[in-house]
Image (cartoon, rainbow, N blue to C red):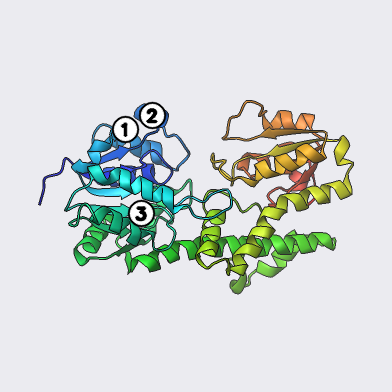
Amino acid sequence: MPEFAYDVCVVGGAGHIGLPLALALADKGRRVIAHDIDEKAFALIGSGKMPFMDAGAEEVLARVLGKTLTLTTDPSVISQSEYVIVTIGTPVDEHLNPVFRSMKDFGESLVPYLHDGQVVILRSTLYPSSTQRMRQIWQKHHPGLEVCFCPERIAQGHALEELHSLPQIVAGFERWAIDKAAKLFRLLTPEIVEVNPLEAELTKLFTNSYRYIQFAAANQFYMIAGDYGADFKEIYRAMTHEYPRMRDFPKAGFASGPCLFKDTMQLSAFTNNRFSLGHNAMLINEGLPHFLVERAKNAYPLVDMTTGILGMAFKAECDDKRDSLSYKLKKILEIESREVICSDEYIREKDFVSAEELVEKCDLIFLGAPHKKYRSLNYQSKPVMDVWNALEPERNQGKRVL
């Protein structure tokens, strides 16, 4: 057994998946080296600050930085690590088709730094069969190396919490590698779910697609209710109150972010576009911003109004704007209204204003992401398009339109 300078190397260690995992393992006393090409992010992390929001992460970072956690942009550290955890997943192109070529190129770029005896753990969403294909690429040069797929299933912003509270899925090809991967993840949680690699890849895609479809069902019902002048808030209350079979039914709202939509489209591509539920969910969820604007046009002279969007992140209490539908809403409003003003509690952009200034300047307000602050904001009796049903009009002095 070769001697390793590090127990774990996390490739992509400055990202939303890699950094919380690196922190969690380092906090358990493992010697962790986080590798990434993002020098700006590493400079921030090295100063003791997180580059994104994650509950409790800065406290853990303070405990482990410079002790059990090291940061580097040098890929040679990969060869010095017993476990190599890769947090790079299969991307999709502008036509929403998976791009395995980029994964292949990335895999081949690691070949000079890998060697026999290592276990490479793939962590991000993969197009089905990618684990097998990456194993073939690496074993061509290093036949004694093994590959596992252990997909993350965390809710963004709560990674450190859920790494310890959720069972970990472990999949591999050889018993010794499966056992090693399971041993590593048992540092975080006692419960391991073992399946084969294809089953693990589909588990991740099925999970995210199911959530995306659930949101689409709620959003479709919301649109139907709106078309007929019914209050979806009251319908939702009637559906879910003390009725256990509807306990997991979500509220309406933007279904966006870097995972659900992308993974649904990957599953569609894998089934040769026969995943009609996924396609229909995409049409509903991606169409919600258009629906809100059309409703506003029916109620107000939108073309003569200054509109505002409160919350540009893809979900509440989050600083991630990737694939946020608030930006799609902004593009539509730039066509349909006189002017658009944006604000967010956690995202800073050049033209953003404070929530209070947005309310002061706007004639009509859209709630893009229901950050907690917006519940106590004084809306000055201005109309608010609240698809999330996050506000209480009487308390907030605002007239909720939807």
| Picture quadrant where residue 342 is located | top right
At 69% across and 69% down in the image, what residue appears? 239
Instruction: Mark yes or no: residue 24 visible.
Output: no
Per the rendering, the mark at residue 313 is none
Mark positioned earlier in the residue sequence (3 or 2) = 2
Mark positioned earlier in the residue sequence (2 or 1) = 2
Count residues near mark 1 (Cα–Cα under 10 Å), then give few for <14, some for 14-19, many for 20+: some
Q: Is residue 67 above or below residue 144?
A: above
Question: In the image, which is nearer the foreground, mark 1 or mark 3?
Answer: 1
Q: Amino acid at mark 2?
A: Glu
Measure how far apart labels 1 and 3 are at the Cα level: 28 Å
Q: CB of mark 3 within 8 Å of CB of mark 2?
A: no
Q: Amino acid at mark 1?
A: Thr
Can you identify the residue that label 3 sits on? 164
Residue 398 on image: x %, y % = 79, 42
Residue 315 on image: x %, y % = 59, 47
Measure how far apart labels 3 and 2 are at the Cα level: 29 Å
At 71% across and 63% down in the image, what residue appears? 220
Residue 177 on image: x %, y % = 22, 60
Can you identify the residue that label 2 sits on? 39
Mark positioned earlier in the residue sequence (1 or 3) = 1
Residue 351 on image: x %, y % = 66, 27
**SS at badge 1:** loop
Q: Amino acid at mark 3?
A: His
Position of 120 with respect to 236 (left or right) is left
Per the rendering, the mark at residue 73 is 1
**SS at badge 2:** helix
